[in-house]
Image (spheres, rainbow, N blue to C red):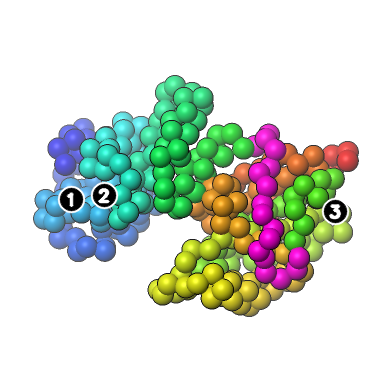
């Protein structure tokens, strides 16, 4: 990739070529990004392209480089990666949803930094209007929500399909602060939040906090395709076994609603105040302290 080679020269990095097997590249690049070592990530991607060519693994790795560069404030490198992805993936393709989503995400953040929030929202809105894949729509919505959802009325959730306790619609919960926990049955990070969530629930439920877990159908159980009925059984099983201490918390199953909330990253937390206004949108894990501080602010407000 010529443009990435140019950046390698700018970084004065000399690397030894290493053979990277398909399936290992993305994992290696993610590890390098976690360590803040973009240069080694670039070297691995360039070597893979020379030996294997442009394939989904390569493009996915470039997407991760783009995200890492943007997070580490290397906007020059992020822009180069975006240009590479735009050249190779000019439109949505079924087998390239992840790198195409990374392209839109990073480009929107670059636009926000250069032209402002309004321009980024227009770009994301155009992308959402064209997107068909649910995971891509969810990812675009996540980025729209990060820029605009806090301070706005909470989007509704359809409570017609649920597991466990019967849920109330958000409109019927006005007057109470509401914490939404957007999760997926297969999500390890979601399960890792279970104990924290249970402690927070126990601490604030008597003070008026309502808690709703929301998820969607993904069409699979494990590696196999599944009907909604089969997947619902799995959702109920995982919630019962992995989320102890949360008995009585309703689990809403609303694919359209969860996509609207942009839960492409799970868990996602949404805190809604007594007036139905979103006060926190966090597509990430949160500590008990972070959750408690935000909830206490909303609970302290006059009904």
Asked which secondary structure carries label 3, the reply is loop
Residue identified by numbered label 1: 54
Q: Are marks 2 and 1 in contact (CB under 8 Å)?
A: yes
Q: N-terminal of the two: label 2 or label 1?
A: 1
Residue 165 in magenta stretch:
yes
Element class at badge 1:
loop
Marks 1 and 3, the one that precedes in the sequence = 1
First in residue order: circle 2 vs circle 3: 2
Q: Quadrant of the N terminus?
A: top left
Q: Nearer the viewer, residue 15 or 156?
A: 156
Q: Is residue 148 positioned above or below 142 on the image?
A: above
The residue that label 2 is drawn on is 59
Q: Residue at x 79, y 39 (%)?
A: 275
Q: Is residue 231 above or below residue 87?
A: below
Q: Is residue 242 above or below residue 265?
A: below
Magenta stretch in the rendered image: 150-166
Q: State which quadrant residue 205 falls in.
A: bottom right
Q: Is residue 48 magenta?
A: no
Mark 3 = which residue? 208
Q: Residue at x 50, y 40 (%)?
A: 143
Magenta stretch mostly in which secondary structure?
loop
Residue 166: where, in percent of width, then height? 76, 65
The CA span between labels 2 and 1 is 7 Å
| Residue 9 in view | no
Residue toward you, 301 or 118: 118
> Residue placed farthest to the top in the image?
115
Secondary element type, mark 2: helix
Instruction: State the count of labels.
Output: 3
Residue at point 14% right, 52% down? 53
Front-most of 199 and 302?
302
Q: Is residue 36 shown left or right of residue 174?
A: left
């Amino acid at each position: 990739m010529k443009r990435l080679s140019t950046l390698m020269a700018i970084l004065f990095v000399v690397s030894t070529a290493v053979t990277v097997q398909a399936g290992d590249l993305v994992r290696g690049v993610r590890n390098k990004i976690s360590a803040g070592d973009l240069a080694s990530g670039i070297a691995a991607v360039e070597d893979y392209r020379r030996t294997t060519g442009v394939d989904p693994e390569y493009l996915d790795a470039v997407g991760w480089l783009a995200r890492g560069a943007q997070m580490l404030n290397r906007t020059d490198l992020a822009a180069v990666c975006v240009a590479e992805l735009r050249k190779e993936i000019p439109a949505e393709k079924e087998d390239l949803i992840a790198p195409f989503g990374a392209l839109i995400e990073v480009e929107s953040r670059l636009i926000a930094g250069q032209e402002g929030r309004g321009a980024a929202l227009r770009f994301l809105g155009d992308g959402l209007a064209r997107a068909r894949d649910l995971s891509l729509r969810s990812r675009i919505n996540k980025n729209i929500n990060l820029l605009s959802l806090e301070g706005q009325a909470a989007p509704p959730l359809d409570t017609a399909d649920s597991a466990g306790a019967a849920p109330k619609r958000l409109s019927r919960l006005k007057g109470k602060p509401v914490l939404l926990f957007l999760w997926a049955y297969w999500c390890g990070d979601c399960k890792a939040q279970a104990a924290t969530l249970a402690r927070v629930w126990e601490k604030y439920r008597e003070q008026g906090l309502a808690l709703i877990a929301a998820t969607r159908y993904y069409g699979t159980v494990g590696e196999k395709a599944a009907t909604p009925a089969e997947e619902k059984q799995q959702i109920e099983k995982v919630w019962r076994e992995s989320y102890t201490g949360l008995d009585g918390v309703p689990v809403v199953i609303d694919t359209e609603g969860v996509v609207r909330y942009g839960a492409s990253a799970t868990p996602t937390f949404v805190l809604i105040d007594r007036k139905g206004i979103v006060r926190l949108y966090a597509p990430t894990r949160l500590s008990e302290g972070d959750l408690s501080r935000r909830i206490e602010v909303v609970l302290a407000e006059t009904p």
